[in-house]
Image: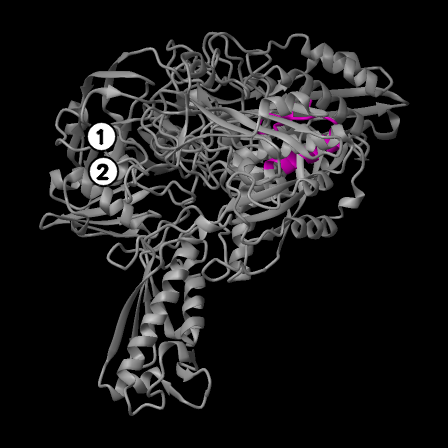
Amino acid sequence: MIEFTYARASDPSHALLLGAAQDARFLGGGTNLVDLMRETVERPRELVDVTGLASGIEETASGGLRIGAATRNTALAEHPLVRSRYPVLSRAVLAGASAQIRNMATVAGNLLQRTRCSYFYDEDGSRCNKRAPGQGCDALEGLNRGHAILGASDACVAVHPSDMCVALAVLDATVEIEGAEGTRQIAFADFHRLPGDTPHAETLLQPGELITAIELPPLSNEARSAYRKVRDRSSYAFALVSVAAVLRLEGGTIAEARVALGGVAHKPWRAAKAEAILIGQAPSPELFRRAADAELTQARPLRDNGFKIELAARTITAVLSDIAGDAA
Amino acid sequence: MRGAATFAAEFAPENMAYAAVVFATIARGRVTALDIAAATGAPGVVLVLTHENAPRLKPMPLFMTAGKAGGGDDLPILQDAEVHYNGQPIALVLAETLEQAEHAASLIEATYEIDEAVTTLEAGKARGTRTGIAFGQPAHVEIGKPEDELATAAHRFEATYTTPRHNHNAIEPHAVTLYWQDGELYMHDAVQAVNHVAWSVGSVFGLGEDKVHVTSPYVGGGFGSKVLWSHQILAAVAAREAGRPVRLSLSREGVYRTVGGRAQTEQRVALGADAQGRLQALQHTGTVIMSAHNALPEPFILSAQSSYATKSMLLDIQVATLDMLANTFMRAPGEAVGSFGLESAMDELAERLGIDPIELRIRNEPEKDPMKGLPFSSRQVVWCWRTAAERFGWDKRQAPGLRREGEWLVGLGCAMAGYPYQRMPGGAAGITLTADGRAQVSVAAHEMGMGTSTVHTQVAADRLALPMDAIEFRYGDNALPGVVLAGGSQQTASVGSAIIVATRELVKELLQLAGNASPLAGLSADEVGTTHGGLASLADPQRYESYASILSRAGRFELSVVGQAPMPGEGMHWSMHSHGAIFVEARVNAVTGEVRVPRLTGAYDCGRILNPKTATSQLRGGIIMGLGAALMEETQVDPRNGRIMNASLSEYHLPVHLDVPDIEVIFSDIPDPVSPMGARGIGEIGITGVSAAVANAVYNATGKRVRDLPITLDKLL
């Protein structure tokens, strides 16, 4: 580990002031950042602890929820309003990590967690464009069973590891950000970026900017949602494929359909092509499979991860069939 | 549990410095430049050690090349610029704190000249293989005419099974705290072979083993890995150069890089059977990977040597030499992966013959050891099958692919487990009896969490007829009697046989001390037994005197004896094995291919069970390890540079709690008539058979046969 200073922010403006220093990083639960510092993949000179800032969950005027950035994952998953109104979010959070890690990890930290690509982690022995721009990507032709099938580039084939973010993607959340210029909002779907030629730039967050809250718009009472995670062991493993979905049926047809995938792309992958096929149709397993296949025609397998295409198609179909229940 | 046990990395001698190791990042070649300027100048740095400034040392003596040789490999350590594998130590930094040492180590920049490397089994095979030498013998067995018998058998089955590399992941990473004093080396080391380490380290430094003092009071798991690897030598060199005590605790990554694991295997099993399913040919052949500096070709043929009666047999291990870290012993080396091939193939043969897999195995029960021709000391395989089958509910098994509950396909499978009895020469035990009626029993044995100290306290209490709280069992120190490797599931037999002999010595000495004034006067050692904290005549129990009374009358404060275990002749006259039958229920998700195992039942014949609680725990641990091997465990090596890419517990998957179901373990508890306490080993058998039983259950659930471990979901989609 490389030496760094540590300061605890007392309020957002204090945090912004401290965070403006060169090579400063905001510290949430530290469940990812501190690991990366130990591996010298992350080398901040200053850590600004923001866990003392907004951590409440409150209803908004529109009937949605505003989740403070420092809310712990466990608190989010257990909150009665989250459990009753956004069960997909609660389930996604509980599918991630372990109870101990969820007790520490914060909501904003979860958004900013970095890929688990082993070449990214291997600072000593592997090349990575995300860690060292321009160095090359050893995963592209290497061991890539866990890597991306959608939206990847030759520069980077890593995936975003979060479960929570897959649920936030189908909930059309908004990310609230404070910076020197004031407060701004970014649609969750836009917050994370695809790798392109700049895989080190993972989000739209600018240096020194601080995530202060996540806002969830209200979800119709008629909508049903689910999260399913497929992995190599029962717990404490990242998703090979995960699916979050929201469906609302009206008079036997699909009035609203939102589908997002985890474990397949550099960002939580909103399956817009699948959604377009679902809208206005009568639900059936055949329709769901057709929608999944339509989304996955753009998938590009690597050497070891071709199975993810079929796995994603099957999981999407199963999740939507589950939600539709007897209607399908 | 108080958390008060002191492990090797928790000793803190005054003025201790901390070491961090720099590992090579290429598979083969040499270091052309090593920039240590930044590291040398970094805060707190005491010493930077490289091949350019390290003192000249002999290589570690490779395991099995001498009685107490305990080195995992015999490569030079910081002696030249050559790199033999990705992960080889190329520098060491000593600093005032661990953080300073690790930071400085990260500042060292190596430049390499890279040679072409052989990093895969396929490439190794292409370069040519050689017959493996396992335990001093060529790994080749041919009995009868295996090719002819296979060709003419009524039924033939042949398939290839593959198992990946595995790494050791004991909960305690390898660690040593050591210092030099007056030319002698004092090591607190996490090892399962204190005498081997002392002798081998002495050999590297040109010291007699009496100048190397090794203690290993608590070890957080060994499984074959806690022997001598480069880190102990590096730490000892650094301590001598710096003139300070040193602690070197390998990081988890460091264990992956420098401590060998289980080798990859490619096994062909060919079975020929007559119309009734009796084996006419049993062929188990294949290729394993090894480094050129290594003693263990993964002996996957061991299960086939004693499992089944067969008219002919062909066993052969070919070695493909790779540029890799030396592989090593890992819980049931040989049987753990060999039983996957053999027991999967028996299941496949049973199906082709239309015979129940248990019935097929019982039809092939041998009357004597099929390879050595020796009688079995005790063999309760049929009991294992019948008992476990009934408890498990084998009669509920259906044809493949028929049982479905929602998304889950449900299947049942079974396999035979087995591990040989061993007792190595060198067992010895000391007993010191004190006038207050207490006894200290001392053996240079090891407690790695398996219950050694509990069991031998119990054994000694039983032998000496003293309450358990009057026994102090001392172990984990090469100053104590005996050369006792905690390996090969042999420690308990070795220690137990030594305690038996030592007790007898003690009785003789006590009778001499007792003299004519004692009620025991005139009795010989054969005529007395231990009872109620003393000795009594076997013929007339009224003739009794307590140890305390004998000692105090003789004016002695204490009495010490050392007993040497007899040479282990039992294994030369008898075929001795523990056996078991393991049953698995597997559920395979029809949508995702995910496999979950909700239930395992094993019945085991391991001779007499000395302590049911610790024994059951040993078996369960082995079974869980087998479950990991079946479903998830795999060292991922990048073929381009031979680098292990999942050198952490987050990416190298082992079963987590949610993966571990209810595991029922049943013991025959039938004493072995020729082993010292009626007991055979229990440490390794648990892992054997499990991966085959899982694969067989997965087949029964889905109709899909997976012959390549681990059985990950992508193989079932």
Percent of width and height locating residue B247:
24, 44
| Residue B453 in which image quadrant | bottom left
Looking at the rendering, in which quadrant would you find the N terminus of chain A? Answer: top left
Q: Which residues are magenta?
A: B691-717
Please tell me which residue lies in front, B94 or A256.
Answer: B94
What amino acid does circle 1 point to? Ile
Q: Residue B576's x, y, as percent?
A: 51, 49
Protein chain holding label 2: B
Which chain is mark 1 on?
B
Viewer-proximal residue, A7 or A271? A271
Asked whether residue A65 is in view, the answer is no
Please report the residue visible at 52 percent of the width from the left and 31 percent of the height from the top. Answer: A110
Q: How far separated are the C-alphas under marks 2 and 1? A: 8 Å
Say which residue appears at 9% left-offset and 50% top-offset.
Answer: B182
Q: Which of the two residues, B226 or B59, is positioned nearer the viewer here?
A: B59
Res B546 → quadrant: bottom left
Q: What secondary structure is marked by label 2? A: helix
**Residue B702 is a magenta residue:** yes
Q: Position of residue A286 (x, y in %)?
A: 83, 17
The disc, 2 or 1, on the residue closer to the chain's N-terminal end is 1
| Neighbour tally class for label 2: few under 14, some 14-19, many 20 plus, Cα within 10 Å | many
Task: Assign the C terminus of chain A to one quadrant of the image.
Answer: top right
Of the numbered discs in the image, which one, if any, rests on residue B225?
none
Circle 1 residue: B77
User: Residue under circle 2?
Assistant: B233
Q: Amino acid at mark 2?
A: Ile
